[in-house]
Amino acid sequence: MDRIPILKLRDYLLVTIQVELHDQLAVTLQDDLTQQLSRTHARGVLIDISALEIVDSFIGRTLAHIASMARIMDANTVIVGMRPAVAITLIELGMSLTGIKTALNVDKGMDLLRQSDVHGSDLA
Amino acid sequence: MDRIPILKLRDYLLVTIQVELHDQLAVTLQDDLTQQLSRTHARGVLIDISALEIVDSFIGRTLAHIASMARIMDANTVIVGMRPAVAITLIELGMSLTGIKTALNVDKGMDLLRQSDVHGSDLA
């Protein structure tokens, strides 16, 4: 697998991460996402990590980079589907994912993105 | 990876197939989908195969099984994101995916599911 598919759902982009994110795959995902944001004028990015049993510091940094890139392209990022064990690990690793919003599932994540749209970005 | 995540999007379930579907993974996906249909009362299933470069007869049959199971659980199935080369291969394999609806992307697939809801299932 050479790239992670990015799905367009109305005004948002949805990425489901199912495989281990090695270096090249992470770079490709970042490239693809910025291009899709530019092409589709999407207002937000939803990243589902429910398939990930482990989120190490590399993935944590990659997610933070994606959120930062999306933010300067005028889109909010919401991480959804984080497993309890992953949340514990992230905090133990000292990664609090500052600036990244999270929601329990895609529905709640989309609600969050819609609210951010209405009230203006508070991720700035 | 032991299972493919199933995302709930309002009244629909979304599955993005990114990895090769081996036997056990396909069985697990079918089990999980029927359980989710029962639990969430979803009205339709969207299966995105844009990441698949090859769809062999096993995957074709699995998709047909999923659509049949969803149908008897009162949900329509739409396959989205099929690559042109995959469409060619399927027809050459003699698999016309009878009874499965297709759409070019998730947005169009959701439109199709909504129309089916309004006009009643025509997959019967």
Image: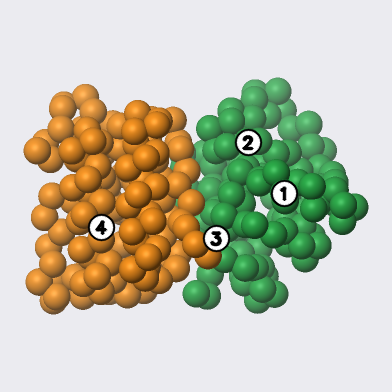
Chain colours: A orange, B green
Where residue A114 appears, as percent x and y from the top left, is 28, 31
Q: First in sequence: mark 1 or mark 3?
A: 3
Q: Residue at x 65, y 36 (%)?
A: B103
Q: Nearer the viewer, residue B80 or B11?
A: B80
Question: In the rendering, at what x and y percent does residue B54 appear?
Answer: 69, 59
Say yes or no: labels 3 and 4 on the same chain: no
Judged from the image, the secondary structure of the residue bearing numbered disc 1 is helix
Location of residue A64 (image quadrant): bottom left
Of circles 1 and 2, which is in front?
1
3 and 2 marks on the same chain: yes
Q: Earlier in the sequence, mark 1 or mark 2?
A: 1
Question: Which residue lies under the disc numbered 2?
Answer: B104
Q: Chain of mark 1?
A: B
Instruction: Report which residue position mark 1 lands on.
Output: B85
- Secondary structure of residue under mark 4: helix
Q: Which residue is mark 4?
A: A63
The chain holding disc 3 is B
- Callout 3: 10 Å neighbours few (<14), some, many (20+)? many
Asked whether the residues under the numbered discs 1 and 3 touch, taking CB atoms below 8 Å apart as contact, a structural biologist would say no
Residue that numbered label 3 is attached to:
B18
Helix, strand or loop at label 2? It is loop
Q: Nearer the viewer, residue B72 or B63?
A: B63
Q: Label 4, label 2: how many angstroms apart (C-alpha)? A: 28 Å
Answer with left or right where residue A14 lies relative to residue A118: right
Query: Vertical placement of A3 versus B114: above or below?
Result: below
Amino acid type of the residue that numbered disc 2 sits on in the rendered structure: Leu
- In three-dimensional space, the C-alpha distance between marks 1 and 2, rounded to whole angstroms, equals 14 Å
Q: Amino acid at mark 4?
A: Leu
User: What separation in Å lies between label 3 and label 4 (alpha carbons)?
Assistant: 19 Å
